[in-house]
Amino acid sequence: MIPPARRALLIRNEAKGGAWVAEVMARLAAAGLVVEDTPTASCEAACAAIAGASADLILVAGGDGTLNGVAPALLEAGKPVGVLPLGTANDLARTLGLPLDAAGAAEVIADGATRRIDVGFANGRPFFNVASLGLSAELAATLDSGAKHRFGRLSYALAALRVLMHAKPFRAAIAAEGEVARTHTYQIAVGNGRYHGGGVAVSEDAEIDDGELVLYSLEPGSLWKVVALAPLFRRGRHLRWREVRTASGTALEIRTPSPMPVNLDGELATETPLALTVRPKAVEVFAPR
């Protein structure tokens, strides 16, 4: 159990509502935590609250976008982090093996077990799950918060269908381990964690604490093969296909003929050229034993 009288700062996206808060606060209080509830309307406000906190640990309630937005503040604070999943995809929660509801995740925090996880950096910006360009970046641009709120994970499928109908391959150069590969691809994704896009695995053996980034590039030549690969993505077995290029390492670089938007944990946050690195064991998080 968590030692008595520890103080926690609860950062939550107020747009997600607060019907769950009382149950979570009661469970954490029973475990000896004194929780300061801090609803915020923006990542900037959330980062400011974290920076000024004197709490022993930080609890973040929201989706992957919220976690990505406060990642710089979490790194700076250097305190244990509890994830309370309230998003549509909740890919970091999936990677950590957390229950995908706030009450269940609160039980994990109350239990007190932690692990240290890696953080990826894309052009200096931190990310937990995946940095990607191509199909997934177009998907992020297509999705709107209203659709995600109304349709949940179905919104990803609907938006993906729209993106696939207009998808075109692009040229890129991928530098990894001192070698450069030039390719014609529909998507390049670089994973720090295991999951992205609502449970799509980067690879079947990707881990968020292995000190490496894992890259895959979809190079099937025709769009129907991308669709044919879809069932393999859930378990990360798409990497077994010869139409999927793979690479791994602690530092990768991606260049395109002209700047392309890059999706970090579901948010368009930077663009190519893209320099990727990993900081091993950078954040301590509550996770199942």
Image (cartoon, helix red, strand yellow):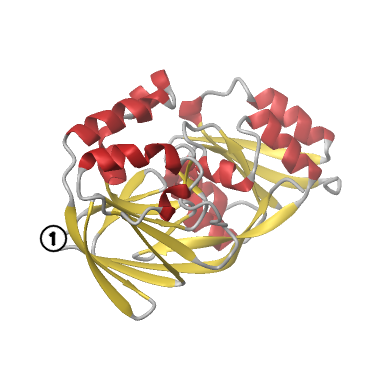
Residue reaching furthest to the left? 258
Could you tell me which residue is drawn at 24 percent across and 38 percent down?
224
Pinpoint residue 282: horizontal percent, then vertical percent. Answer: 58, 64
Residue at image position (29%, 42%) is 226
User: Which residue lies under the disc numbered 1?
Assistant: 258
Q: Position of residue 174 (x, y in %)?
A: 28, 68
- Position of residue 27 in the picture relative to residue 95 (left or right): right
The one nearer the camera, 178 or 271, is: 178
Q: Please tell me whether residue 132 is drawn above or below residue 16 in the rendered image.
A: below
Q: Within the image, what quadrant is residue 230 found in?
A: top left
Left or right of 266 on screen, residue 27? right
The residue closer to the viewer here, 103 or 42, is 103
Looking at the rendered structure, the number of numbered marks drawn on it comes to 1
Label 1: element kind: loop
Q: At 19% across and 32% down in the image, what residue appears? A: 165
Residue 11: where, in percent of width, then height? 57, 40
The kind of residue tagged 1 is Ser
Tell me if mark 1 has few (under 14), some (14-19) or many (20+) residues whose alpha carbon lies within 10 angstroms of its own: few
The answer to whether residue 18 is left or right of residue 8 is left
Vertical comparison of 262 with 212: above or below: above
